[in-house]
Image: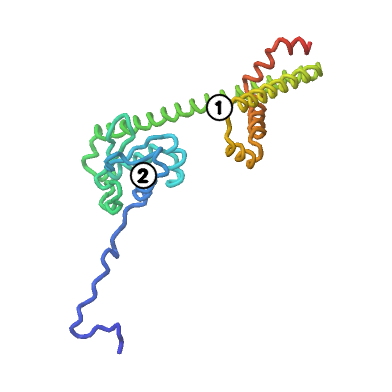
Amino acid sequence: MNPFQLQEGDPPPKPVEGLHEVGPPPFLIKTFEIVEDPNTDHIVSWNRGGTSFVVWDLHSFSTFLLPRHFKHSNFSSFIRQLNTYGFRKIEADKWEFANDGFLFGQRQLLKSIKRRASFGSSPSTNDPCTELRREKQLLMMELVCLRQQQQTMRSYIKAMEQRIEGAERKQRQMMSFLARAMQSPSFLHQLLKQRDMRLQEIEDEAAERERGSSMSELEALALEMQGCGKQRGVKEEEDMVVEGELDDGFWEELLSNESLASTSS
């Protein structure tokens, strides 16, 4: 007896529900995943009510997120895709878009978003004024996008120029220091002498603080078990001095010191 053969009185089989149902387009799925990702909320995120999404950092969105998910970095093309699926821009001065089927935490609504018919198939789009207004809007949005990218690049270039200028200034200070050291060995001797004086001042201050503080026997025992906290504290302060000797203030003080200049000459 064949177990798969229908018997008399058995109801006919029904197709599995949703078997032939078409899922949401890949563009909507990827866009939803980008907005839902909490790790990129500083770039793009939902609004407070979860009824729209906002692109906060246009440069990072175009540079990192679009190539990662859509294999391109054209923000204008992304906007045209949104318009194709009926998204609307909420505010003129902010990249905020909304759609009735694109809501926070409701991924199942994506299948309700339908792609608009092409411009040529719709009689209403044959109006030249309508097409011109649509093209003007897209061009204005692309112009704003390019201006923001230009501003971001200017800020980046300015920051790089400042870093290069600082590196060149430190290099000139180092070369001037080496030139003085080569001209007069007493210059290095005087520099080491000043460093020793600084370390001696630190040690004296640490000793004064220890003499002025009353320490219980329990605290003294704890310090002894930790391996003489005094020497360790002095060593840490010495390390801080050594690390701080090569900053801009150190070079300016060193190269403008009249006594060292007279010694090097």
Residue 218 percent across, percent down from the top left:
58, 39
Residue 88 vertical placement versus 147 (above, below): below
Residue 82 vertical placement versus 11 (above, below): above
The amino acid type of the residue labelled 1 equals Met
Residue 202 percent across, percent down from the top left:
65, 24
The answer to whether residue 119 is seen in the rendering is no
Mark 1 lies on residue: 160
Q: Residue 37 carries which label?
A: none
Residue 160 vertical placement versus 9 (above, below): above
Question: Residue, x 29% and y 45% (percent of image)?
Answer: 85
Question: Residue, x 39% and y 46% (percent of image)?
Answer: 37
Density class for disc 2 (Cα within 10 Å; few <14, some 14-19, many ≥20) is many
Q: In this view, does 152 lie to the left or right of 197?
A: left
The quarter of the displayed image where residue 120 is located: top left
> If the image is split into quadrants, where does the N terminus sit?
bottom left
Q: Could you say which is closer to the camera, residue 43 or residue 249? A: 249
Q: For mark 1, give the secondary structure.
A: helix
Q: Residue 35 carries which label?
A: 2
Q: In this view, does 135 lie to the left or right of 180?
A: left
Q: Could you say which is closer to the camera, residue 86 or residue 10? A: 10
The answer to whether residue 39 is seen in the rendering is yes
> If the image is split into quadrants, where does the C terminus sit?
top right
Q: In this view, does 182 lie to the left or right of 45?
A: right
Q: Could you say which is closer to the camera, residue 8 or residue 213? A: 213
Q: For mark 2, give the secondary structure.
A: helix
Question: Residue, x 46% and y 38% (percent of image)?
Answer: 63
Q: In this view, does 220 lie to the left or right of 93?
A: right
Q: Are marks 1 and 2 in contact (CB under 8 Å)?
A: no
Question: Residue, x 42% and y 44% (percent of image)?
Answer: 39
